[in-house]
Amino acid sequence: MNIRFVPFEEIDKNKWNGTVHYAQNGNVFGYYWYLKSVVKEWDAFVEGDYQSVMPVPRTKLNALQKSLLPFLGPYTVNEISEKRILSFYRLWEIKYFNTFYAFNDQITEYIPEPKTIKKISCIDMSDGYEAIFDKYTEPVKSILNQISINDYVFSNVGKPEIFLGKDALSEADKNILYRLFYNAIQRGIGFSLKVENPKKNHWQKHFL
């Protein structure tokens, strides 16, 4: 198994995206445009002619970046085997062991669990409403049961500068979200939404 280190400047963008797209454990977090929006530059471990790839951020991630990268590599179009995953893990262990890394949720069963590996729980929005509802705690269910759709007005927020204008975020973090916002809208995979309760003069913004 030939796995090599590839610096960001030498990553083949098209081959990279192809691997993430066709990988049986692929997800949006691994695409070139998404990673570039969140971390700007990253290096990688690459198997063969991009049969498998594993992005490794060059710099320490802040809290927002970690939340935006819940599941990363390795991504592979080959068999997800213990041997393959451990090969990538050992390379990461040698060079990046003391850094945060959210290993792809479909391969964590094959690797040890040091404290530096972060596992993040997410709600699968592809489930039906009842299945999603059952995953909430009882206090949250109580709040949701009191909500009536007729109490709310939905509208488009518009530009990300308006969407995030009053948020208490650093300029660096806002720029990350701006890049994600524009990239997602350009690709037709995201939109902004303003949810307002006119009676209580309360509103929230969502990016989906």
Image: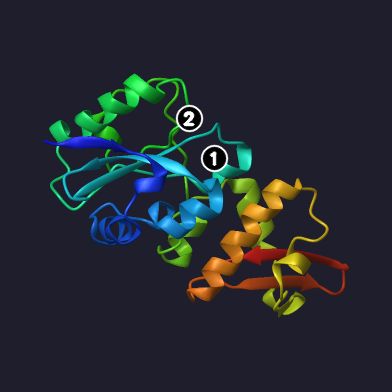
Q: 61 left or right of 58?
A: right
Helix, strand, or loop for circle 1?
Answer: helix
- Percent of width and height locating residue 134: 48, 54
Q: 166 left or right of 142?
A: right
- Percent of width and height locating residue 87: 20, 30
Q: Which residue is drawn at the image coordinates 80% and 61% (left, top)? A: 165
Helix, strand, or loop for circle 2?
Answer: loop
Q: Amino acid at mark 1?
A: Lys
Residue nearer the viewer, 187 or 143? 187
Which quarter of the rendered picture does the C terminus lie within? bottom right
Q: Is residue 125 visible?
A: yes
Q: Which residue is drawn at the image coordinates 35% and 47% (left, top)? A: 10
The residue carrying pointer 1 sits among few (fewer than 14), some (14 to 19) or many (20 or more) residues within 10 Å by Cα, namely some
Colour approach in the figure: rainbow
Residue at the disc numbered 1: 66
- Percent of width and height locating residue 37: 54, 55
Q: Is residue 163 above or below residue 198?
A: above
- Percent of width and height locating residue 105: 34, 42
Ranked by sequence position, the earlier of labels 2 and 1 is 1
Q: Which numbered marker is on residue 100?
A: 2
Is the Cβ of the residue at disc 2 closer than 8 Å to that at disc 1?
yes
Q: 87 left or right of 134?
A: left
Which quarter of the rendered picture does the N terminus lie within? top left
The residue carrying pointer 2 sits among few (fewer than 14), some (14 to 19) or many (20 or more) residues within 10 Å by Cα, namely some
Count the marks: how many? Answer: 2
Q: Is residue 113 visible?
A: no
Rounded to the nearest angstrom, the CA distance separating label 2 from label 1 is 8 Å
Q: Which numbered marker is on residue 170?
A: none
Q: Amino acid at mark 2?
A: Phe
Residue nearer the viewer, 77 or 127? 77
Q: Is residue 109 above or below residue 187?
A: above
